[in-house]
Image (spheres, rainbow, N blue to C red):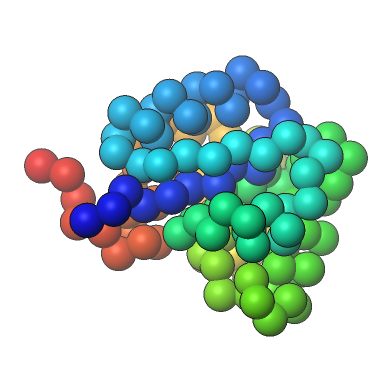
Amino acid sequence: MSKPKVLLAEDDVTMLSLLKTLLNMEGFEVAALLAEADVPEALRTEKPDILLMDVHLANQSGLDILDEIRNTQDVSGVRVIMSSGSNLKHECMKHGANGFLLKPYMPDELIKILQNTLNLPEAQ
């Protein structure tokens, strides 16, 4: 079985580095975007199983990007987990997110939500 692929849209380079390391250790393939990246285009190029995206990106709104994804036919079905330091779960879910993580979160919270959203068996 191939590794599930996670696309990261996060503008904090330290967080990005930590997430890449953690997810690689947990058996995920990981691709990361620069803060200014065109996320829908990256979805077409990378073809991830899931997108983990910060609500507040440097010069972009994660919610606006999520709206664009949900309204663009060829990428609308990608699963999206949003994250933020503010509790915006209700708003993210209203915009079509598949899940939400409140920062700071523990690594096991991230892995659990990814496994659940991707319908993966939990590691023993």
Image coordinates of residue 66 in percent, x first then y, are 71, 63
At x 37%, y 32%, the residue is 24
Image coordinates of residue 60 in percent, x first then y, are 85, 46
Quadrant where the image shows the C terminus: top left
Query: Could you say which is closer to the camera, residue 105 or residue 51?
Result: 51
At x 56%, y 75%, the residue is 77
Image coordinates of residue 105 in percent, x first then y, are 48, 33
Residue 68 lies, with reference to residue 20, above or below; the image says below
Q: Is residue 88 left or right of residue 77?
A: right
The single residue placed furthest to the front in the displayed view is 45
User: In the picture, residue 8 is in which quadrant?
Assistant: top right
Residue 77 lies, with reference to residue 93, above or below; the image says below
The single residue placed furthest to the right in the displayed view is 59
Image coordinates of residue 33 in percent, x first then y, are 67, 39
At x 57%, y 53%, the residue is 46
At x 51%, y 56%, the residue is 48
Q: State whether residue 76 appears in this view.
A: yes
Q: Is residue 10 left or right of residue 59?
A: left
Quadrant where the image shows the N terminus: bottom left
